[in-house]
Amino acid sequence: MAERISPLASGRPVYIVDGSRTPFLRARGKPGAFTASDLAFQAGRALLLRQPFAPQEFDQVILGCVMPGPSEANIARVVALRLGCGESMPAWTVQRNCASGLQALDSAARAVASGDSDLILAGGVESMSHAPVLLGTAMVAWLGQLSQARSIPARLKTLARFRPAFMKPVIGLRQGLTDPIVELNMGQTAEILAHRFDISRESMDAFALRSHQRLARAMKAGHLNEIETIYAPDGTFHDVDDGLRSDSSLEKLAALKPVFDRPFGKVTAGNSAQITDGAAWVIMASELAVKKFDLPVMGQILDTQWAGLDPAQMGLGPVYAMAPLVQRNHLKSHEVDYWEINEAFAVQVQACLRAWQDETFCKNELGLREAFDPIDEDRLNVDGGGVSIGHPVGASGARIVLHLVKTLQRTNSRRGVASLCIGGGQGGAMLVERVA
Amino acid sequence: MNRDAGHHDIYTEVDQDNVAWLHFAKHGSSTNVLSASVLEDFYKELLDLAERAPRGLVILSDKSNGFIAGADVREFTRLENRDQALEAIQRGQEVFDRLAALPFPTVALIHGFCLGGGLELALACRYRVSRDDPSTRLGLPEVKLGIHPGFGGSARLTHLVGAVHAMDLMLSGRTVDGRTAARMGFVDHVVPERHLKTAARALILQPGSAHRASKLQTMSNHAWVRPGLARLFEHRVARKASRDHYPAPYALIELWQQHADQQRSMMHAEAESVAKLIVGPTAQNLIRVFLLQEQLKALGRGSDYKARHVHVVGAGLMGGDIAAWCALRGLRVTLQDQSAERIAPAIKRASQLFSRRLKRPRPIQEAMDRLAPDPKGVGIGTADVVIEAIFEDAEAKRSLYAMLEPRMRDDAILATNTSSIPLAELRTALRTPSRLVGLHFFNPVAKMQLVEIVRDENTDPDVVARALAFTGLIDRLPLPVSSTPGFLVNRILLPYLLEAVELESEGVPSPEIDRQALQFGMPLGPLELADTVGLDICLHVAEILGRHFAVAVPQRLRALVAQGRLGRKSGRGFYRYRKGEPVKTSLPKGYHSNPDILDRLLLRMLNETVACLRENVVGSADHLDAGMVYGTGFAPFRGGPLHYIETTGADVILQRLHELEQQFGERFRPDPGWESVSGFTNSGIRK
């Protein structure tokens, strides 16, 4: 593998100066109280209110989102205007499936590093509960014919051609979570990893339980202070991640039926990420902006890496992205203080950990001479992950980077890696460092 | 052909297509009004045009705020008698008849305000084109001044769109935007600014037939239908205004019922009816109140100070609603309270207010976006105005100010919404004590237009000026009051409420007490008002005022509060509440009403009014009347409490006070101020 110099490593330093997120709210079978732009707006409004600079001072706004609502085309611009960033604010939306939020941060970081921008608002958002339900092609075609039929007999003839099957809706969310190339849904790609690495149902349930326990502990300890309370017009407010199942147990998890490979699979709703609504932002600044506005520096983005792999095993994406990242930065696993590997599925993170220290895998698939030293699970997803917190696809990348930097700050430690697997067969990883 | 636009209130240009464009451009004013002299100029212009015979005529306004805002209300106050009024009205009709009779197409090109006489002028044109935006408002609000349209408007509108829409507009006095006007049928095209002139030109160059009422609309004016419809209209009006207090809507219904067949005779009757109404006491008092409102509005325009960000501390009923109102009026607002639980209900009420007022999703979203919950008080440091609206406790307020002041900008206003505590007690914790000012809003904030601006000799005059401007900016009426306990409104209201409690504890049925007040013209009876405010709050205010004035708090009030009967909010006070509405039981059989009841209620209020005037709680008698009308809803058709004293005769009232003092003791002892009031003449409108 040829060693490349990242513009992030060679360019101007890129600082994270602040960030916020909404609580992640579990989808409850109907559209939630907040659209994607509402979520991003509310997290952003609270964040911008406390800044010593006006919202117009940003050079650009970048927002990751997989499925903005029909009235949220270029949602980044919609939210930038609602936040009062001004008519002259350039804003663009990025889409890299589950890593859309990370992509937004990477794009922002590169713009700061290269000298294009000094102050950027970057983040991710998803309102999965608002994912559209679409009309099938047959229905659309029939409606088209009907509108073109002018005479009454022609209209009657077209009407007679209607079939009840036309009414079958296309669930946008299901469609979005299915790989169109290998024709597998994301849960099935997780089943493939379970089979390949021989990971048991019990083991993945235990991982899921631990995720909930860690989130519960973090909530109690106040480690989630990046959350901003959001308010709905009906007088309700939300200030915690409501996917937490504090009463979860191995028995309860064991009772759940597999949802993707029925009836023999192992991946259940309990050991998968939850379908969730949420948004997360970070403010990225150059040294110039930090000085100009006297901003408190939380952390620095040192490097990012993207990688592609077999779409049917997309869950291993983090391994493919993290490997060149740590190698290029001459790091051993134990030299990274904290890890965030997004929990799309419990088994998918577990498979990554196995592959990371598997010599055969590292030699054959990554072309390395040896395996990595293991990642200490006590330093991985320390405050819960997608299984407990939820995984609003476009938002998670921004959430894990923000939380990683917060964790480094809280623990006075130095380095962290945040990584996600990406539907369609990719991985993304970012290396951050606390700035003392 | 073009005339110099600079020196005429009205001028006409004729373009290359021989279309005449008649501009209303009232000199030295931001608004076009139809004064007598403007009407005469317009008439001359019409005579010229008739001779010149252009291809068509477009009438438009050069003022950015609108077309024509109506007649010159000040002229109404100079009418000495009915005949003089009739002459003026008939002249107006004559001018508009001349416009309607022009042999070429005529178009009124409407933007912004098109009200009263302005709309009547437009209705005399063959076509009307309206700008499509929320700031374009059309209406015939004459009824709010105690009259109805007189320049042919009631005859023309009922003919044009039928009685249902026409009477709805004229009886309610409400205004509508261009789209609604087009839907009703009295606007032909609603177009954005960029197509206004094109649309007007098209109507002249390719004139079609003028709009006609539909068959159904025409039928509404039919002789067989009118009696039934008239009863329906009367029924609707009666729910809002009684015939004795507000004769105009009833006169309009009668006028229409008798003459709707015959436009000519309806015009004639219309003029007669308005001439009679306009010199009557209701119209003159309502016009007085309108002019008082203009006085208060002018106070809000005295400075070019512009606040953009308001921080409100306290998300209770008042604080939350003040915050929502400011957001509705376009300001950025941060709303602070101790927790999200306390803020969330205010967000819900704000959402309801915005939905009601703004209707369309995007403006509602914009208003919601402007209102930021702020439990940590981040907004304190950037706000132009910080309004404290926490509970009535001087110590709590002082410690709050001590926290707020160091975090606030030096030039920010610190305002308190206290309803009773003098500033002198509150400002002691401040480094700059002169910066504290009172902004006393009334409940419900969205409905009560008055805001008392509380200041004393230690308040920085510049802060007062900015507080006035801020109040004007959020479209409320500022009333400067001195920082004496209870200020103006609550101080005058309290004895009236306490007397009602006294009456109730003597055994007078609550509905009877309230009925008498309603009959006098109050918007709400005193006991229902006390229930609405909250009996605990009434008691609290009474106790605070009791420390400064000889106010005896009735035992009954203490007892009710002790029992947890706090009024509407607890479901029970003087009334029981079912679904938020008081259950008013009927009077016991054989109950005889006592004329003392109203006198006792009213005279305690009037006595306190005179005390406030004597103590200069407000700057003038007019300000006092304005404050009571807009702060309590004191019967507007009576022109305010001092005006009422004047019209009834101070000596008559004083005599009655003496009698009541004999009977009930010192709470009816006449204030020393009556001596000066007996010779007192109001500076406002005289009959």
Image (tube, coloured by chain):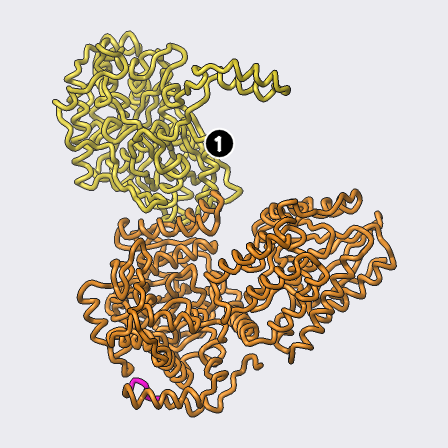
B562 vs A424, nearest the viewer: B562
The amino acid at mark 1 is: Ala
**Left of A207 or right of it: where is B415?**
right
At horizontal 50% and vertical 83% (from top left) the residue drawn is B647
Closer-to-camera residue (B439/A77)? B439
Instruction: Decide: is A151 above or below B152.
Output: above
- The magenta span reads B666-670
Q: Residue at x 71, y 63 (%)?
A: B265
The chain ID associated with circle 1 is: A
Q: Residues within 10 Å of mark 1 (few under 14, many from 20)?
A: few
Please, what is the dominant secondary structure of the magenta stretch? helix
Q: Is residue B617 visible?
A: yes
Q: Is residue B15 left or right of residue B73?
A: right
Q: Is residue A315 left or right of residue B107?
A: left
Is residue A8 visible in this depiction of the protein? Answer: no
Q: Please identify the quadrant where the N terminus of chain B is shown.
A: bottom right
Chain displayed in orange: B
The spot of residue B134 in percent (x, y) is: 56, 50
Which shade of the palette goes to chain A?
A: yellow
Q: Position of residue A147 (x, y in %)?
A: 58, 22
User: Is A22 colored magenta in this rendering?
Assistant: no
SS of the residue under disc 1 = loop
Residue that carries the numbered disc 1 in the rendered image: A73
Say whether residue B12 is left or right of residue A59.
right
